[in-house]
Amino acid sequence: MAEQVYCQLKDLVENHTKNMVQQFLGESMDKLIFMKKMNEAWSGHCQQIIMCRSIFLFLDRTYVLQHPGVLSIWDLGLDTFRRHILTHQLVQTRTVEGILMLIEQERHGDMVDRSLLKSLLRMLADLQIYQDAFEKKFLAATEKLYAAEGQKLINDLPVPGYLAHAEKRLREENERLLHYLDQSSKWQLIHTVEKQLLAQHLSSILSKGLDLLLEENRTEDLQLMYNLLGRVKTGQQELCSKMAEYVKKRGKVIVINPEKDKTMVQELLDFKEKLDKILRQCFRNNDKFVTSLKDSFESFINQRQNKPAEMI
């Protein structure tokens, strides 16, 4: 008897869900309208399955539990929606393209319906097709966008402006994870942004911006540079090397010119004090940076026999 009831319920759910797919197969349908219809269909389907589960609760807790190969009423509802609606190629393509369209619009500064995005992405996750149907295309679109953006802006913006933009983009992507993207996308998404906006342009960021920021004592910008490059493999290591190059070059100017002998000691003390402050405020007194600074000072002070050491 229980098996018969379950089979009849299953047939009803199957037939009802099959009939739903036609509304998504129209020739020309606005993407946003399509997404709203999909969300309404999904929400309605979930409510109906919850109601069925309530009505057939005894069946769900006895017959289903006693037969391991039989799906629970809730899982039956998910499986049926996935098979008849979301694995239909046209329906899946339209759904994913609509989601990607809204995310792209938001990335370009438009206001979008985040609750709609959250509901549809949750649907894909519940149906266990989030990774295969959506995530691969989403990450490819993300890489394409930020590759082009990084290439353009590294040439158009001064380094402090570029770093501020990279920080803003990382913050925005973390907000998307908070509001509607599945947490399983976090590592790949953030890594893609870091790669395209920071790692790919590491040498340009350092060669175009570091000397100027150090020279002008731009502590906030230097702190941001240190923090962002810390997200990239070898980023802080290369920052440390470039800082050492600057210190040697700038220090050599002070000690190599005999005409500066009268002011040399004070200039060296001022230079050291400025760099110590940058190390504390911007580079968190990183041991490697401290050691590198010490070695750089020793290097340029020895450029003129013993004169600087003697005067100090």
Image (cartoon, helix red, strand yellow):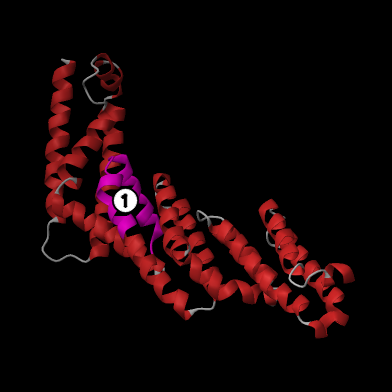
The quadrant of the picture occupied by the C terminus is bottom right
Residue 138 located within the stretch drawn in magenta = yes
Q: Residue at x 41, y 54 (%)?
A: 189
Residue 130 located within the stretch drawn in magenta = yes
Q: Nearer the viewer, residue 34 or 211?
A: 211
Outermost residue toward the front in this view: 305
Could you tell me the amino acid type at mark 1? Answer: Glu
Q: Nearer the viewer, residue 255 or 82?
A: 255
Q: Secondary structure at mark 1?
A: helix
Q: Is 285 displayed left or right of 112 in the figure?
A: right
Q: How many marks?
A: 1
Q: Nearer the viewer, residue 61 or 227?
A: 227
Q: Quadrant of residue 279?
A: bottom right
- Up the image or down, 244 lies above or below 78; here it is below
- Res. 37 in view: no
The residue stretch that appears in magenta: 112-140
Q: Residues within 10 Å of mark 1 (few under 14, many from 20)?
A: many
Image coordinates of residue 107 in percent, x first then y, are 40, 67
Image coordinates of residue 302 in percent, x first then y, are 76, 67
Q: Is 253 displayed left or right of 133 in the figure?
A: right
Q: Residue at x 21, y 22 (%)?
A: 70
Q: Residue at x 27, y 36 (%)?
A: 49
Residue, disc 1: 135
Image coordinates of residue 280 in percent, x first then y, are 74, 59
Q: Is 294 displayed left or right of 58 in the figure?
A: right
Outermost residue toward the bottom in this view: 259
- Res. 8 in view: yes
Image coordinates of residue 68 in percent, x first then y, are 25, 18
Which SS does the magenta portion mostly show? helix
